[in-house]
Amino acid sequence: MQAQIAAGARDYFFIALVGMRKRKLRSWLTMLGIFVGIAAVVGLISVSRGMQTAIAEQFSTVGADRVIVQPGSAFFGPPGSSAGLAKITKHDIELIRKTRGVENAAGYVLKTARMEFNGKTKFVFGIGLPADDTIAVFGSRFDISYGRGFRKGDGRVAIIGNAYSTNEDLLGKTIGIGDTIAVEGEEMRVVGVRKKLGDPENDVAVLAPISTLWEIYGNKDEYSAIMAEVAEGFKPSQVAERIKEEMRRDRKQERGNEDFQVQTSEELFASFTTILGIVQAVIIGIAAISLIVGSIGVMNTMYTAVLERTREIGVMKAVGARNRDVMLLFLIESGLYGLAGGLVGIAFGLGMGKLVEFAATNYLGSELLKASTSPYLILGALAFSFLLGCISGVAPARQAARLNPVQALRYE
């Protein structure tokens, strides 16, 4: 009995494949909508998975046990903007360091800087960092590839992004240890090269002692943000709440009206993930339109197949085929349309993902856009495309199964 069922299933697949081969052009046009939609979904998911992994790696350089304090709130504008924002100062650092659960804290300055070298100018991020042991609070994000870090008493010295030491196209030639660059017209001697992060903006940033940037920009004692390291045995979320309470009390502010933001590094990562998920959902929604069009195409093709094979259906029923046999035959054929479209779509989608990765790496200098796939993604896409094809063929298959064998044999 099982052998007969297996033989019958093989016959169904063989008949369906023969029908698809006889109508090659129509079959390709039918699969077009399916494989375009599947390609878009697979390509997007593979890129977004890779991007999420890359962002997670970036956050891992800071550490999960960090709390970030920035100026700004829902009423005062986003972090990084300047209009209407209160200042974050040394006083706040001392306050945070005294908060229960805080191991240490340090601030940094982030500015847009005009950098000059070899007669060429480039606008980059200028990052001011402490020239003492508190720089360890920032984790490995500011680690040096070669050269040295900042020391107490350092003045006009700089650590350059990794791109300057490897890409001579940026400023006409590469920059090395001992070279002199100008930041906002002030000369600085290069003492170190930062490790490569794969982020274009950070790989061309210029690091300097925070006291030097204060002198250049004239905003002494003001920080762009403060990072606090949570002591062992304490939860970052609980320490973040304590910091909020201390700063509210110190600034005499009520809950909800703060002119500062306190977030854990995990919360920041979750925010990035949420935004990425929203963008992904929107684009998948657009791609779903193509899948709907593709499913309508499969349905239309199967209705046409029913009309073309009406006499064949009559012959099948006359020799003993049951309604469910006819229905299963057409369901398998419609499922194969979806499966074939899914196979082509997966190949195109993975190729698109790798193309985006190649373009980002070689033309944008970014390693954040990477394509990442898994067997579950491929199997899931194949199962979905086959199921979509089967669902699209349900109505035509039911119509074929209900045909009267006598009328079907008379059909011209």
Image (tube, rainbow, N blue to C red):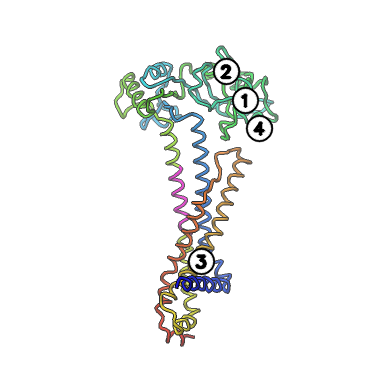
C-alpha separation, residue under disc 1 versus residue under disc 2: 11 Å
The image's mark for residue 336 is 3
C-alpha separation, residue under disc 2 versus residue under disc 3: 64 Å
Disc 2 residue type (three-letter): Phe
Q: Kindly report which numbered mark, 2 or 3, lies closer to the viewer in this rendering.
A: 3
Disc 3 residue type (three-letter): Leu
Q: Is residue 269 above or below residue 351?
A: above
Disc 3 packing (10 Å; few <14; some 14–19; many ≥20): many
Locate residue 185, reporting x and y percent.
Answer: 61, 20
Q: Secondary structure at mark 3?
A: helix
Q: Which residue is mark 2?
A: 150
Q: Is residue 208 rendered to the left or right of residue 313?
A: right
Q: Is residue 115 visible?
A: no
Q: Which residue is mark 4?
A: 170
The magenta segment is 276-290
Tags 1 and 2 in contact by the CB under 8 Å rule?
A: no
Front residue of 126 and 322: 322
Residue 283 lies in the magenta-colored region: yes
Q: Is residue 107 visible?
A: yes
Tags 4 and 2 in contact by the CB under 8 Å rule?
A: no
